[in-house]
Image (cartoon, rainbow, N blue to C red):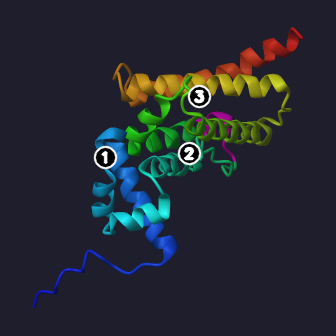
Amino acid sequence: MSTAPAPRWQRLGHDERRRQILACARRLFSERSYDAVSTTEIANEAGVARGLLHHYFGTKRDLYLEVVRELMRMPSNPVPLEAPGRGLRHVIEESVNRWLTMLERNRGTWLAANAARGLGARDPELEAILEEAREQAADRLIEALQTYEAATAPPALRALIRSYSGFAEAASIEWLARERLTREQLHTMLTTTFLCLIKEVLAAMEIRR
């Protein structure tokens, strides 16, 4: 005996409904550009009335900003600090791998968000979200260095890591949008560059102070 399909419209709690709408919006924004996605489509995908979507998130732009904010809350450099017996290279390799996986899963949203690089005057809210994520990524990498290398954190280290972050973002566009790099090539480039910056460039900078 076949069972009837579950109804599309379900009664959910506030937080669960909000997460459901965000998940649908994140998927649609990742598949297509911001302008190509409508609030009606998002509401239909989430199984809610469009009015309820506006009640939770306001305008489409407000919802989009929250999608980007949620994406950036996934640590921009998810450094696996708990890796006993393994050195810094392993930690950075794993960190880069997790980051690239996150980008693949959220390709459209990432590319759209990074189109705002250097356009903070035009879209200060979006740039503020990205800037906060970059600082948090720097914090995590500095924490990893202090854990595995017993390193201090001079101002030059944060500057170096922030510069690396910009490099990684630009390189991700070469991979995802322009397809000039494979994932494997990008993984090697980001891992090797980071280790070179820390072990050689930072040391040279400190010696010359």
**Left or right: 167, with 154 as reference point:** left
- Identify the element where label 2 is drawn: helix
Split into 4 quadrants, where in the image is the C terminus?
top right
Q: Nearer the viewer, residue 84 or 164?
A: 164
- Quarter in which the N terminus is drawn: bottom left
Q: CA distance from mark 1 to mark 3?
A: 23 Å
Kindly identify which numbered label has been placed on residue 72: 2
Q: Secondary structure at mark 3?
A: loop
Disc number placed over residue 90 in the picture, else none = none
Please name the residue that numbered disc 3 is placed on: 120
Task: Relative to 104, say whether 188 is above or below.
Answer: above
Left or right: 208, with 26 as reference point = right
Q: Position of residue 105 (x, y in %)?
A: 39, 45
Residue bounds of the magenta highlight: 85-92
User: Circle 1 — which element?
Assistant: loop
Which residue position is annotated with label 1? 37
Rounded to the nearest angstrom, the CA distance separating label 1 from label 2 is 20 Å
Within 10 angstroms of label 3, few (less than 14), some, or many (20 or more) residues? some
Q: Position of residue 49 (x, y in %)?
A: 33, 68
- Taking 140 as reference, is 53 above or below it? below
**Badges 1 and 2: C-beta atoms under 8 Å apart?**
no
